[in-house]
Amino acid sequence: MTNIRFSTFLFSLLFAGLLTLHQPTFGQTPQGPSVKTDSELFTTGDTITISGNAGSNDAGPLAEIVIWNPEGALYRSSDVQVAPDGSFVYETIAGGRQGVNGTYQVVLLYNRQQTSTAFNFASSGTRLEVIVADKSYYVLAHSASEHTSWLGITAHPESKSLAIRVDTAGPDTLKLELDKSLIDTNSNCFVVHVDNQIVDARCAGIDEQTRLLSLRVPAGADELGITGSFLVPEFAPLNMLILLAGAFGSIMIGNRVLQFRNNGCSQGYKE
């Protein structure tokens, strides 16, 4: 009887030991890298949050996130900080020049390993065309609800501003993609008016060429005014002046080189 009890005790002890070996330790770093997005579908102006674990941080504090758009073009590329436990978080804003509809591939590169995930992007909003100096430019306008109708857009070069006509049946949150080739600012954000009243607005960079402007509008709003540091017509004379200055400088340098050669040749002939 004693032997049976002793054998049962040894078996229980061995079984408990095996369970301990197979149980993960609390806070243990996952084996291998992982990456995910906080949603499977994004639209214009949404924040895309990419997170995961690099598996460790043995290869240094930085990993690389690369995003390819559905056409195979590079959409985003950035270094991301890797925490001591291997975790990371990266955020970017959906939209911009390379923001075409379809499935995007997200690749995490770290310590000669890579893993990937995917998300879908569907552009939303109204494409507003504005003609400045006989050239067409576009602003992508997006509203959070169906309260807002977009009626048109006008450029005012003399005040470096855009006027957007709207019809808002109720309070709404508006987002506008503004191309820097059309309008830009030297400040953190544009000066924004709603029916001639200055309102709070936020700006964020979607990519190197595109700003995202976000603001709240009340019911009954008729016009948005967006004022920057410069509007596209200013680029033309500025570029012309730069070209003229460059051409003048090249002519002056060419004349000096020619004069030097002529003097050198004349002196050599006299000798």
Image: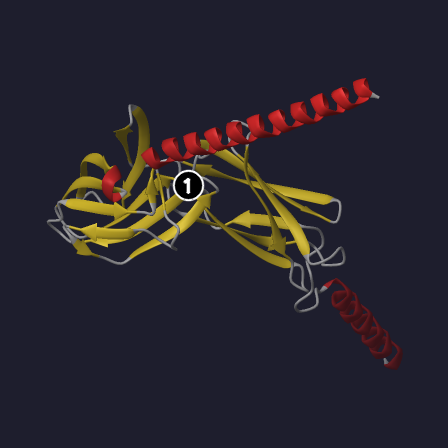
> Three-letter amino acid code at disc 1?
Thr
Residue located at (28% from left, 53% from top): 191
Where does residue 110 sit, x and y in percent of width and height? 70, 48
Where does residue 133 sit, x and y in percent of width and height? 29, 27
- Viewer-side residue, 17 vs 26: 26
Q: Is residue 144 visible?
A: no
- Image colouring: secondary structure
Where does residue 107 sit, x and y in percent of width and height? 61, 41
- Viewer-side residue, 86 vs 262: 262
Label 1 Cα crowd, 10 Å radius (few <14 / some 14-19 / many 20+): many
**Quadrant location, the C terminus:** top right
Drawn side of residue 235 relative to residue 259, left or right: left
Image quadrant of residue 23? bottom right
Residue located at (76% from left, 20% from top): 265
**Quadrant location, the N terminus:** bottom right
Drawn side of residue 194 relative to residue 174, left or right: left
Drawn side of residue 71 relative to residue 254, left or right: left
Q: Is residue 25 above or below residue 222?
A: below
- Viewer-side residue, 37 vs 77: 77
Residue located at (34% from left, 36% from top): 234
Q: Is residue 215 visible?
A: yes
Farthest residue to the bottom: give it. 2
Name the secondary structure under disc 1.
strand
Residue occupied by mark 1: 210
Where does residue 210 sit, x and y in percent of width and height? 41, 41
Image quadrant of residue 31? bottom right
